[in-house]
Amino acid sequence: MLYPVIWWLGASLKKTEEMSLPSIWPQSPMWENYTKGWHFSADFSFTHFFANTLTMEFWNVLGAVITSSLVAYGFARLQFKLRAFWFSILLLTMMLPGQVTVIPQYIMYNHFGLVDSYIPLILPHFFGGGAFFVFLLVQFIRGIPRELDEAAKIDGASVYGIYARIIFPLLKPSLVTVAIFTFIWSWDDFFGQVLYLSSVEKYTVGLALRMFIDQFEIQWGQLLAMSLLSIVPSVIVFFLAQKHFVEGITTTGLKG
């Protein structure tokens, strides 16, 4: 499992002509592959591309955490007509291939003049965050005793007050799971980024890596160095929140 990562690190320190050699580690490591790769473009460095990506990730995570918990709270606690029907429709969307909605979504965003912006990549996260997240949070909320809601009602809390003061704080483990999945999936969403972003100044890290391929002579050492750095944020986020991530997956309510 670790061998590809070790080879990746060694290859990022090689010269282009050394890539075909069987040795994993180069005789003379070229650490300058990282500095040259970081500033490979005359107009933008990877500082700019990382800033673009992290800004987009912030809004994606924020939207998914807030709206998925709100929608899940509605399905788990509120009574309204056809609740079971709409929840079934929500779950059915999990079976719908993403490729089916690509063309109509692109036509819609293009009609509103939103292509070549981050809005098509951010906006869906502010409409429930995804059926999987809603389903995950619904199961968690159903495990929270309703006596807490009733006690809050006696104290004069409204429906939104119960959500904000009771449900939302207790959702912390599951919300961390939502945040991690949203961050990693959005970070790896190369197809969506290449579909909606065309201006270089708006490129994310994934699209910036593609620019190495567009060059006449590919600097493989620099490309591998930057691609290795591109996974660092996802790895850091996962390990920092690993405890809450596992807890959010395994728990379905309050511990006795």
Image (spheres, rainbow, N blue to C red):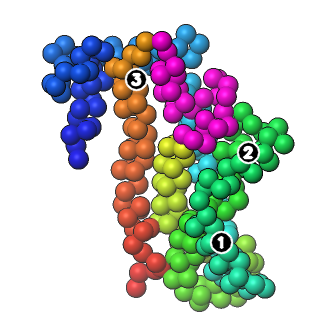
Q: Is residue 116 visible?
A: yes
User: Crowdedness of circle 1 by 10 Å Cα count: few (<14), some, many (20+)?
Assistant: some
Is 256 left, or right, of 69 in this rendering? Answer: left
Label 2 close to label 3 by CB (< 8 Å): no
Q: Which residues are magenta?
A: 190-216
User: What percent of the width, then of the height, locates residue 38?
Assistant: 45, 19
What kind of element bears circle 3?
A: helix
Q: Which of the two discs, 2 and 3, labels the residue nearer the N terminus? A: 2
User: What percent of the width, then of the height, locates residue 32?
Assistant: 33, 13
What kind of element bears circle 2?
A: helix
Residue placed under numbered mark 3 in the picture: 223
Pair 1/2: label in front:
2
Residue placed under numbered mark 2 in the picture: 106
User: What percent of the width, then of the height, locates residue 111?
Assistant: 84, 42
Q: Amino acid at mark 2?
A: Tyr
Q: Quadrant of the C terminus?
A: bottom left
Above or below residue 19? Residue 99 is: below
